[in-house]
Amino acid sequence: MQPQPRRPRTGSAGPLGRRISRRRLAALACVTALTFTVSTSAGTGRLAPGSTAAGAGPIDLSRDSAHGPCMIRGAREVQMSEGIPTSDGYARSTGTVRALTLMIDFSDAPGEGRALNRFREFFPQTRQWFRTSSYGRLDYRPETPIPSWLRMPKSFRDYGIERGAPFDPGYRGLVRDIVAAADPKVDFRNYDLLNVLVTPNAGPSALDTVLSVTFAGNPEAPRADGVPLANASFVYSRQDDGSGSYGRTGYRVLPHENGHVFGLPDLYTAEGGGAVGHWDIMSEDWGANNDFLGWHKWKLGWLDADQVHCAASPGTTEYTLTPLARAGGPKLVVVPLNTRTSYAVELRTRAGNDETVCRPGILIYKVDAEVDTGMGPVTVHDSRRDSGGCTRAPNVHAELSDAPFRAGETFRDARRGVVITVVGAKAGPYGGYRVRVTRE
């Protein structure tokens, strides 16, 4: 087990890396994410000169608007906060996003087969996954201007890369060598993020330990063509768990890693995926397909203001929610508890990226903007505790698979005076459920 994430020191000279452990599920270890927060850089929260502070998405809601009370925020030192809007420094998550994708190998781990075969393990599936999840608002374009293996000047062993390795010195040296090797054929200014697909025979098997990692919002990264490579994902060994699903689902480590470059935190904890289960790819990126939470779609700019209801006032109000996987219609009810925490309510069905949903219904979860990535910033409430779940899909956290609430079922938080009741299904062009929110 890797050490727990640490908070950056106040007034530190630069952003600090975080090391996050990941659990095994049926002997499958997943991605170790290591991130940076620009908010701690020199105490200014600003990017290095010449870089672009694009932010994660076009969420321009004013805090004076009806949504203001629901736009919870964490403290500046929180690592990859679930607060809305996302801090500057991460890659854009709407419009056309160009992903520079390079395949690299080493003298002690030469690339096996054609480099483009490695590229095809992830594309076009990753592009389609983002198109489906974003309702077409993210036009993710992977580009590989160098279609062959890019040989690094040092052996893999010499870079000293291992699970949980910090950015310095190994990754800094590796990024510099990638830039030097690719620069004659690549104008780095043309891209929004960097994917490095490492030959799978470099390092241990993913069944033993996982090296895949993302460095996000890192303004101190090496520069190329005048811009810092601040958002970069590295993918190593194939995450084949032996269930026979790799051909369909092995690519999903990359949407997870790219979720970090868009500013999303890890939703698993040191204890495993029990906080969110398979309801978000930032929790479990193995096994069969699954989507983002509605909260993340709002955070990424994929939902319009009229698709998000803010239940901030006392009293009782009914809302209609349409399936999260389908474009159009209201998608999310947010019930703020204070300036940093809220409940979120959405309708999940088996459609789109949610192919493993075995109990459709209303998913209710708590979001805490002051909990660091990898420490449980989101907690799904289980409508059927200790049931064992309903899924039989391999390598899915089964207990929470039947978490959604159905017609006639109620969630209560007596201490905060919040009651959420699923009233029933509602006819209409989108289908949907009605929910009643009562708050004292």
Image: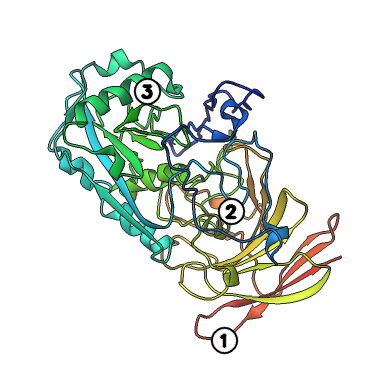
Image coordinates for residue 13, horizontal then vertical, percent: 57, 21
Answer left or right for 291 relative to 194: right
Query: Can I make out residue 248 in this image?
Result: no
**How is the rendered protein coloured?**
rainbow
Distance from Cα at disc 2 to Cα at disc 1: 28 Å
Q: Earlier in the sequence, mark 3 or mark 2?
A: 3
Which residue is at 42% across, 50% downward?
394
> Considering the numbered disc 3 on the image, is that residue within a helix, a strand or a loop?
helix
Q: Is residue 259 above or below residue 206?
A: below
Q: Nearer the viewer, residue 351 or 62?
A: 62
Q: Nearer the viewer, residue 436 or 357?
A: 436
Image coordinates for residue 157, horizontal then vertical, percent: 29, 15
**In the drawing, what numbered circle is on residue 188?**
none
Labels 3 & 1 near each other (Cβ < 8 A): no
**Which residue has dot 3 on it?**
171
Which residue is at 65% across, 79% downward?
424
> Considering the numbered disc 2 on the image, is that residue within a helix, a strand or a loop?
helix
Q: Nearer the viewer, mark 3 or mark 2?
A: 3
What number of labels is visible?
3
Dividing the picture into quadrants, the one containing residue 76 is top right
**Which residue has dot 2 on it?**
400
Q: Which amino acid, mark 1?
A: Ala
Image coordinates for residue 70, horizontal then vertical, percent: 69, 59
Q: Which amino acid, mark 2?
A: Leu
**In the drawing, what numbered circle is on residue 427?**
1
The single residue placed furthest to the top in the displayed view is 158
Query: Can I make out residue 373 in this image?
Result: yes
Image coordinates for residue 129, horizontal then vertical, percent: 36, 57
Dividing the picture into quadrants, the one containing residue 8 is top right
Q: Nearer the viewer, mark 2 or mark 1?
A: 1
> Considering the numbered disc 1 on the image, is that residue within a helix, a strand or a loop?
loop
